[in-house]
Amino acid sequence: SAVISQKPSRDICQRGTSLTIQCQVDSQVTMMFWYRQQPGQSLTLIATANQGSEATYESGFVIDKFPISRPNLTFSTLTVSNMSPEDSSIYLCSVSDRGNYGYTFGSGTRLTVV
Amino acid sequence: QKEVEQNSGPLSVPEGAIASLNCTYSDRGSQSFFWYRQYSGKSPELIMSIYSNGDKEDGRFTAQLNKASQYVSLLIRDSQPSDSATYLCAVNKAGNAGNMLTFGGGTRLMVKP
């Protein structure tokens, strides 16, 4: 399966600032997914990023708050903009490197907004 | 109704016992079903996938799928303290941008020595 390098692993940020999270995959993948996991909760899909097109956002998530880039088939970034304490979560990228046969996750970014 | 539902637990079992984790889903069009294990502070790790009705065994793990009842389960035999984690059920379905995973809320399993 694919190996995903995600960084930063954690960060503490001031409210009102932005943080960009990067995911690098060791193979070319068509689709990359960005999830949020709030404290004590399960994973919620933020958006799906395809190379060469705009990301598709799930209900409750908007591009202005979570802009995503997907410049090539091995890399994507998620920016959390104008952060507030409610954005404190773990953010995870994921790839479907085996079609319907499995999804691999990055190690996650633990974000704390103060 | 949530799309994928799990009992949050905690489910406590003694070491060596069978742990039974359950999951129901609402979308009859779902095609693929996954169980992930997540240790505290770590990212989810795929442990089982299942696509057709019946049982699928892999070592100490058995996944069971019943599409008519929209039910997926995971059995862990000979449970070990190292199995203590949150188990996430995930269902693959077609979304706006293609296939996507929808997760249940997770069941926390505690295996006591």
Image: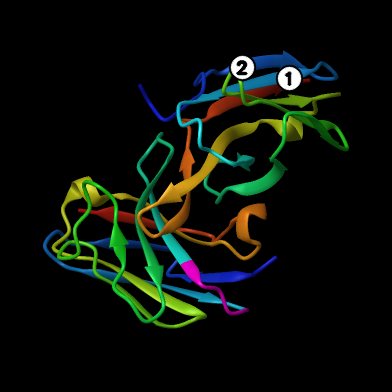
When asked about the image quadrant of residue A29, the answer is bottom right
Label 1 vs 2, first from the N-terminus: 2
Q: Nearer the viewer, residue B35 or B110?
A: B35
Tell me the residue that label 2 is attached to: B11
Q: Is residue A53 left or right of residue B104?
A: left
Q: Residues within 10 Å of mark 2 (few under 14, many from 20)?
A: some
Under circle 2, the secondary element is strand
Q: Point out residue A92 in the picture as x, y percentages from the top left corner.
A: 45, 57
Residue A61 is situated, as x and y percent measured from the top left of the image, at 22, 53
Please check whether the numbered discs 1 and 2 fall on a single chain. yes
User: Where's residue A35, x and y in %?
Assistant: 40, 53
Q: Is residue A14 left or right of residue A56?
A: left
**Three-letter residue code for mark 2:** Leu
Task: Give the residues in magenta.
Answer: A27-31
Q: Quadrant of residue A67?
A: bottom left
Q: Is residue A102 above or below residue B112?
A: below
> Distance from label 1 to label 2 (Cα)?
8 Å
**B104 relative to B23, above or below:** below
Numbered circle sitting on residue B96: none
Residue A28 on the magenta segment: yes
Instruction: Specify the quadrant of the image occupied by residue B22.
Output: top right
Task: Say whether residue A59 is magenta.
Answer: no
Q: Residue at x 59, y 17 (%)?
A: B69
Q: Tell me, yes or no, whether the two marked residues, 1 and 2, touch with CB atoms within 8 Å.
A: yes
Q: Which amino acid lies under the numbered mark 1 shown in the image of this protein?
A: Ala
Residue for badge 1: B19
Query: Circle 1: is it few (<14), some (14-19), or many (20+) Cα within 10 Å?
Result: many
Per the image, label 1 sits on a secondary structure element best described as strand
